[in-house]
């Protein structure tokens, strides 16, 4: 801060000194070279014409013209004192060697101040360019960071969506894997209930009896079998968690069983 203040003071002093020098030179050029004051010399008085001499008989009388009185030379005007706070302009021919040396030194200082001012301007422009470049670099870095954050958020959203989709697929696959076991358990429970009903009627069915034998308890109970198959078909048609392929296969099997009730057994 002190360096900048000293430089500013030198620049101001150099500018004032340059203005003074320019004013002195301009006044000197306007006034022209001034020689030492010399009193004006009045012109010689005119000589009146001399009349021709008279004839020799008469001696001529010479006449002498009396020149007018010569006025005294006026005194050179005194140099007015400069006003308070003003500047006295003196031509260079009236300057002493010391004053000329001081003027040359002042001009050198003014040139040095001008060079320093130009250097300061160049440094300021360089600093401004550096600041502008730094700001542009910071803006580019912030833009890159924002783009990276947006990309990271997008990738995270994609990953979460993929995890949710995989979880849904896993749940569906689990249901499909458990479906055969559930069907088998349902069939076993139905077979057990049918065997218990036959046992309540006093008919003991073998463990490996099929649904036809269990439905009739060894007798021709087509109506009960048809009702049971119709109930099973309704259950399969309204069951959830089954694919259309499995549902169609189960319904087709039940339909075949229903159609087989009306056929008479063929003896082999």
Image (tube, helix red, strand yellow):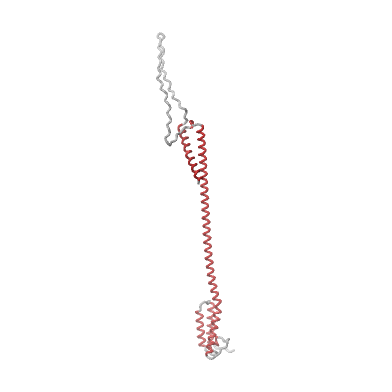
Determine the image quadrant of residue 186: bottom right
Q: Measured along the vertical axis of the image, is residue 234 above or below residue 90?
A: below
Which quarter shows the C terminus? Answer: bottom right
Q: Position of residue 25 (x, y in %)?
A: 47, 35
- Nearest the viewer among 112 and 239 is 112
Q: Residue furthest top?
A: 57
Q: Residue furthest bottom?
A: 202
Figure disc tally: 0
Q: Residue furthest right?
A: 268
Lateral position of residue 128 relative to residue 51, left or right: right
Q: Position of residue 1 (x, y in %)?
A: 50, 46
Q: Position of residue 256 (x, y in %)?
A: 54, 83
- Nearest the viewer among 262 and 176 is 176
- Nearest the viewer among 194 and 17 is 17
Q: Measured along the vertical axis of the image, is residue 87 above or below residue 211?
A: above
Q: Residue furthest front?
A: 2
Q: Position of residue 103 (x, y in %)?
A: 50, 35
């Amino acid at each position: 801060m002190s360096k900048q203040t000293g430089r500013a003071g030198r620049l101001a002093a150099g500018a004032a000194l340059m203005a003074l020098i320019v004013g002195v030179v301009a006044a000197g050029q306007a006034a022209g070279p001034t020689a030492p004051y010399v009193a004006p010399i009045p012109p010689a008085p005119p000589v009146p014409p001399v009349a021709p001499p008279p004839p020799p008989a008469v001696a001529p009388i010479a006449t002498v013209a009396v020149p007018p009185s010569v006025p005294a030379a006026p005194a050179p005007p005194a140099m007015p004192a400069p006003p308070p706070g003003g500047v006295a302009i003196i031509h260079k021919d009236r300057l002493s060697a010391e004053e000329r040396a001081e003027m040359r030194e002042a001009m050198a200082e003014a040139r040095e101040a001008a060079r320093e001012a130009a250097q300061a301007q160049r440094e300021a422009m360089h600093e401004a360019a550096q600041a502008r470049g730094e700001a542009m670099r910071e803006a580019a870095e912030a833009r890159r960071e924002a783009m990276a954050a947006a990309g990271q958020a997008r990738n995270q959203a994609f990953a979460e969506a993929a995890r949710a989709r995989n979880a849904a697929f896993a749940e569906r696959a689990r249901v499909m894997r458990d479906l055969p076991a559930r069907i088998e358990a349902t069939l076993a429970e139905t077979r057990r209930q049918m065997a218990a009903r036959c046992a309540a009627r006093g008919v003991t069915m073998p463990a490996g009896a099929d649904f036809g034998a269990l439905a009739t308890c060894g007798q021709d109970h087509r109506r009960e079998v048809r009702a049971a198959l119709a109930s099973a078909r309704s259950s399969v048609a309204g069951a959830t968690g089954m694919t259309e392929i499995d549902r169609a296969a189960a319904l087709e099997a039940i339909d075949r069983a229903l159609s087989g009730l009306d056929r008479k057994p063929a003896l082999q």
